[in-house]
Image (cartoon, grey):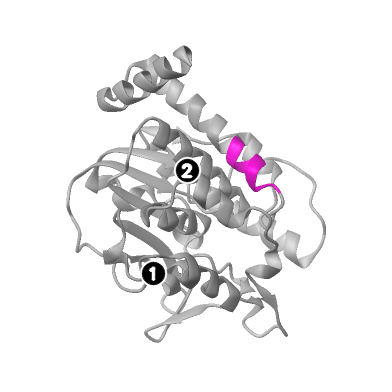
Amino acid sequence: MKDNTNNTKHKLGLVLSGGGAKGFAHIGAFKLMEECRLKPDIIAGTSAGALMGVLFADGYSADEIKDLFTGREFSEFAELQIPKAGLFDSKRFRYFLKRHLRAKNFEDLQIPMVVMATDLDNGESHEFRTGPIVEAVTASCSVPIIFNPVVIKGIHYVDGGLFHNFPVSIIRGECDKIIGVNVTPLIPQKYKQTLMHIAERSYHYMFRANTLEDRIMCDVLIEAEEFGQFKTFDLENVDLISGVGYTAAVKAFEKVINENKHETLVRALSARKKELQTD
């Protein structure tokens, strides 16, 4: 369900796709944006993109976000349960958010944030822009079957990726330029015939299908086939994944410079390029 309460024209929007642990690649994009002194005026994210985005919007630096997840295990964020509405309970994930988020409501974030979730009861996409952050982000990250749906005001919500895994279209009309980070390319690879791996593969097909039009809407598109080599719940390679994200961001920004498009972005990126050459 689209929320049109905010029609402010923003100069630069940042859109972050879902993708589980692949979302650590967003940290690499944050890092390069910091180096180029590019600060988004609004962020939109789904699932892992919502998690990374809300931390960035809350004032955490790229390095600080990476430190939050380095050395952690999946069991610290989810607890296996007797299957009811999902294989895992997300109480530990909620606790993690409550412990580390400085802002409690969207209105308190340093950068406006849009979190995408799916209204499971009415079969439609839903934008969270106001109110409590923790439940909205938990809902956006709740992959069906894997995690319990999140109940907010009597409605059951699950992963926003079912309709908008890469929600560029959600804020396209509000922004002059958009940098998009899509971490869910689907590449052919072997997968195990287990419940978790089949579910993961199936969702990736769905997510890929609803990102095609959004990719075209980006002024700068950051993505790489290398993202596909990492598993959805891989918490052992935070530094490696963020590094892949940084490299992909550099290549995307270099392309913008070479094509001499988007004057404001080119100036910022060219300045950073000169700094690197003199270091």
Mark positioned earlier in the residue sequence (2 or 1): 1
Rendering coords of residue 274 (x, y %):
40, 15
Give the secondary structure at mark 2: helix
Q: Quadrant of residue 35?
A: top left
Residue 57 among magenta residues? no
What secondary structure prevails in the magenta region?
helix
Rendering coords of residue 134 (x, y %):
44, 71
Residue drawn at the location 33% of the way across and 57% of the way down = 113
> Vertical placement of 1 versus 175: above or below?
below
> Vertical placement of 181 versus 70: above or below?
above
Task: Farthest residue to the front: give it.
Answer: 279
Classify 10 Å Cα crowding around label 2: few (below 14), some (14-19), many (20 and above): few
Give the secondary structure at mark 1: helix
Residue 240 among magenta residues? yes
Residue beneath label 1, please? 133
Between 2 and 94, the residue placed more toward the observer is 94
Q: Residue 212's mark? A: 2
Classify 10 Å Cα crowding around label 1: few (below 14), some (14-19), many (20 and above): many
